[in-house]
Amino acid sequence: MFPFRVLNRETVEEILDMASVIETVEKAYTLKATGEASLFPLVFHEFERGKADMDIKSGHLAGANIFGLKLVSWFGANSEKGLPQLIGVVMVLDSSTGVPKGILSGEPVTCMRTGAAGGIGAKYLARKDSQHLLMVGSGHQAPFQIMAVLSTMEHIRKVTIYNANSFERADRFAKTIKEKLMEKFVSRYQDQPDYYRMMAERCEIEFVATDDLEAATRTADIIITATPSRAPLIRKEWVRPGTHITCIGADMEGKQEIDENLFAGAKVYVDDVNQAVHVGELEIPIKKGVFRQEEILGEIGQLILGQIPGRTSEEEITIFDSTGIALQDLLTAEHVLKTAEKRGLGSVVDL
Amino acid sequence: MFPFRVLNRETVEEILDMASVIETVEKAYTLKATGEASLFPLVFHEFERGKADMDIKSGHLAGANIFGLKLVSWFGANSEKGLPQLIGVVMVLDSSTGVPKGILSGEPVTCMRTGAAGGIGAKYLARKDSQHLLMVGSGHQAPFQIMAVLSTMEHIRKVTIYNANSFERADRFAKTIKEKLMEKFVSRYQDQPDYYRMMAERCEIEFVATDDLEAATRTADIIITATPSRAPLIRKEWVRPGTHITCIGADMEGKQEIDENLFAGAKVYVDDVNQAVHVGELEIPIKKGVFRQEEILGEIGQLILGQIPGRTSEEEITIFDSTGIALQDLLTAEHVLKTAEKRGLGSVVDL
């Protein structure tokens, strides 16, 4: 029998801070690039088309001595039952013995590691002097994206928020996001006064909603899309030279957030080639023949390690197609479990 | 947050009795046959060839309102570390909401449901008057197979045990199995005096080891093979008319326990067609062209429901190729979780 740690959502949220998750996700990306991590095939099942499904993403991080899985289920009708639509768990095991280490609520892990991906995309691909972030989408994921970019980019002065369906929602978001960032993310750093002050200062910027996506795009340095869109929102002619775009929303066939023609001539990076070309933002451009898989410059982990070139001029448009990979979840979960052990958090039971 | 039950090996062993597991596994087979259950694709990963691997088997039992997975890892070097080589966990979730219900030690579930399969094969395919069970293999699984057959077949008078590598081990097994059956299985029934007495009586039979597999085969009514063999042990010419054979051991490519020519002319049933022809005892006969997939009469669940014919004469040879399916694990795990809830066993933590 093995000691097995179980951590609920509150505890996972209490443990995770954006700076650590960014560091952890970078590590996951680089382990993949050095061949010390591998993804297993995805299991996907639809209980009822468009109403309920589940997937099991799994993989092995040899470089961190763990393997495991994340199971996420989505039940659209749950909201009527007072339950979350998305419910996930991550289980981590020791890859030198197969011994299960623990299981934890997947939702905060997913939110944080997805945010971190956006921050890392900006860190390695945006112009260092980027000042204006355009956040396309004002849903659940948007605060995580914004916090991650503020964590990695020191000159952001303005964040514009766009919601394709409702200016009101974007406006409400813009009016409350500063407080939310402070409460949800920055408050974690109170025991590191210098870092706390720095991050608090970075939140003292302009947050504004827009219903004019074209105008916002024309002045943005960094664009992040995190929507469930199935049609391009950002048009090629709106994007100025030097812009960096991270696409977060596309994670299954048919999803698309930006003009497929943007890929032609841009420097394109992915988290996982296979996932990106099949279910990512790259799916449509490749299917339409405006971009070829061979034109992908490489995976973000290779870029972080300097194995492949990144941005080489102030004029290039760079794109990071982030589909989300199990290795991000697993390494983040491992970080959570280790921290919980140190702090004595969660329940340890005999398995 | 959800109440999430965690059950360790001891608790799962305490809960499971063979009669309930046989009933549960029959139910799993029939749900599959009526289309109320489906298997998801298998995930398999070898950490080091021949030394360490893991698999994730998952599926959905709509008829029982659950889905879930079993993750089993095998690390050969664990014995040197004082750890079990095989470590497994089963996780069960509610298939109307996606809410995780619990996780439990997989090893006792696997042992019991695999035993139950052998008992069910005999129940539906062996001659009702079968008296002589030949158990090929005296490893960890053998007691489960024997108990299951004694549970489903009332006329067994003799069990012969064969171990291809060591008569001594078979002999030791034969000399201790009665006591082991009583202690491990029959003692569970003390609160059901009639059933306890009946099962105790069924154990009062002859258990004998042999080093003459041919002679044992020539007098057996039921043969169960549960070995890691990669070459046929049972030869066709030894098997007399009317024999039933259940093959348990073959669960990956290259494994084989019985003469491939036995399939020609036999009535052949499987737990899952796809698994059986790819990784089961049927793999080799089909690859060698002595048997065709179309000749499989059907799945055991269809037989249980009377959708397909079973044995129709005292002379037929019947074969059940049992590869082991996730649905057995999931429904057994659900039974364990429900029982644990009733009895207040295990740890309930907040997930």
Image: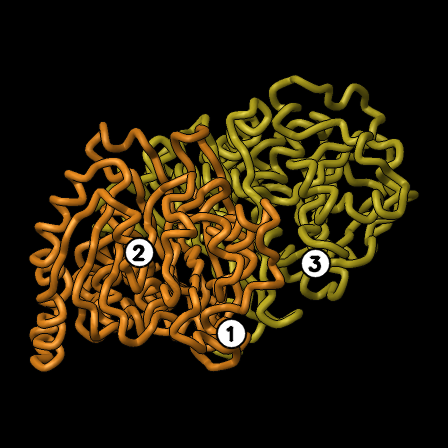
Chain colours: A orange, B yellow
Where in the figure is residue A10, as x and y percent of width and height?
A: 17, 55
Where in the figure is residue B202, as x and y percent of width and height?
A: 57, 37
Which one is nearer the viewer's eye here, A219 or B282? Answer: A219
Q: What residue is rendered at 58% in x and 64% in y?
A: B53
Relative horizontal placement of residue A141, taking residue A289 as reference (left or right):
left
Residue B228: which disc?
Answer: 3
At label 2, the amino acid type is Arg
CA–CA distance between discs 2 and 3? Answer: 66 Å
At label 3, the amino acid type is Pro
Relative horizontal placement of residue B116, taking residue A119 as reference (left or right):
right
Which one is nearer the viewer's eye here, A6 or A61? Answer: A61
Asked whether residue B194 is in view, the answer is no
Mark 2 vs mark 3, foreground winner is: 2
Q: Residue furthest right?
A: B237
Question: Are marks 1 and 2 in one subunit?
Answer: yes
Relative horizontal placement of residue A110, taking residue B331 as reference (left or right):
left
Where in the figure is residue A108, as x and y percent of width and height?
A: 26, 56
**The numbered mark 2 sits on a residue in which chain?**
A
Which one is nearer the viewer's eye here, B26 or B290? Answer: B290
Earlier along the polypeptide chain: callout 1 or callout 2?
1
Residue A218: which disc?
Answer: 2
In the displayed structure, would residue B175 be above or below residue B114?
Answer: below
Q: Quadrant of residue A133?
A: bottom left
Residue B162: which disc?
Answer: none
Question: Are marks 2 and 3 in one subunit?
Answer: no
Q: Are marks 2 and 3 in contact (CB under 8 Å)?
A: no
CA–CA distance between discs 1 and 3? Answer: 38 Å
Q: What residue is rendered at 39% in x and 37% in y?
A: B335
Residue A33: which disc?
Answer: 1
